[in-house]
Image (cartoon, rainbow, N blue to C red):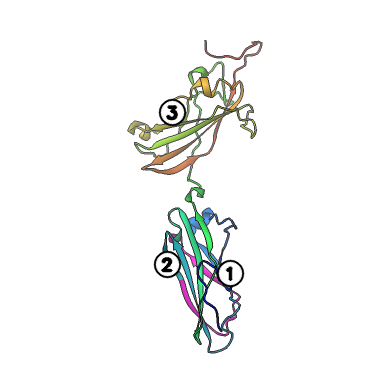
Amino acid sequence: MSMSDSGANGTEALAAPAPQVDDVPPSGQVPAHILQNGGQARIPLWPIHADELGESDRLVVYWRRDGVVSVVSDQTFQGPIQEQEFVIALPRDLWSGDGVAYLYYLVRPVAPPGNRLYSLETELFIDHSVIPLPELLPAAFPDADSWGYLNCTTSRPIWNGVFINIPYQGFQVNDECFFTWRAYTSLNAASGTYIEGTEGVFTHRLSNQEAENVNGFELPPIPFAQYLEPLLHGSGTARYRIRRAGSFIGESRIGLVRVDRYIPGEPLPCGPP
């Protein structure tokens, strides 16, 4: 078996095909399950290979990231080689941190000795933000009635703001709660019914008392004027994330409350006096 030299960048005409990583699309965006559990690459049998007894080929798989090259696998195969592809494990620790990695391989006959051949590279985009955060309990609306409505008779008038309770879940002092409110003209926050301009993103840092309160803690109310006043009959949603020591530890399901600011027989919706 004889091969011509080829650079790892695949510029030579005889470069071998790039390795394929299972479940990674052509865009190179690595899915969450690989980042969490590791993955595997598939290398097709090279066209000129050890096909007789007494011959052997060496396959070395490389991982390049931030200018550092490491060896993922180094194996020698005795001829005649029968496999049509070779599965290479890509352990979980390879995928730590965000960035771009390149996977490629070298094939070289070792008996009899011959020229090496590098493959084309597979470009892999590693972004851990695609991994879903652990799910937290949804936000609750303590002033909603038994049908889940805030209306004109709510005990704390809705023009004083929307009060939200975050259930107790073992949070810690100085945890940060990032919560988002949005309003909709539909009662179920249907797609396409969002009221433009009603999205609000707020931050609250937990005190020790709030973190230890088994009844949960109450967030500062969502201001009426900007975020609720355009909502006459529809719904609002709240979702929150918790950040601890600079890293998010969980994200809630969406909590929903319905809003009805109309009183039968009255021409105008209720609002601030």
Question: What residue range appears in magenta?
Answer: 73-93
Picture disc at residue 219? 3
- Closer to us: 8 or 11: 11
Helix, strand, or loop for circle 2?
A: strand
Give the crowd class for mark 2: few <14, some 14-19, many >=20 residues within 10 Å. few
Distance, label 1 to label 3, CA atoms, is: 56 Å
- Closer to us: 45 or 208: 45
Which three-letter amino acid code belongs to the residue tagged 1? Answer: Pro
In the image, 45: left or right of 94? right
Distance, label 3 to label 2, CA atoms, is: 49 Å
- Closer to us: 135 or 230: 230
Find out whether the residues at labels 1 and 3 contact each other: C-beta distance under 8 Å.
Answer: no
Q: Residue tagged by mark 2?
A: 70
> Vertically, is 216 above or below 54?
above
Q: Is residue 70 visible from the viewing direction of this image?
A: yes
Q: Give the percent coordinates (x, y) of residue 197.
A: 56, 27
Picture disc at residue 17? 1
Q: Looking at this rendering, what residue extends furthest in the bottom direction?
A: 54
Helix, strand, or loop for circle 1?
A: loop
Residue shown at 38% from the left, 38% from the top: 175
Residue shown at 42% from the left, 59% from the top: 66
Which three-letter amino acid code belongs to the residue tagged 2? Answer: Ser
> Is residue 81 magenta-colored?
yes
> Is residue 194 magenta-colored?
no
- Considering only order in the chain, which callout, 3 or 1, is on the residue closer to the N terminus? 1
Which three-letter amino acid code belongs to the residue tagged 3? Answer: Leu
Residue shown at 45% from the left, 53% from the top: 98
- Closer to us: 67 or 130: 67
Q: Give the percent coordinates (x, y) of residue 166.
A: 45, 33
> Vertically, is 83 above or below 100?
below
Q: Quadrant of residue 213?
A: top left
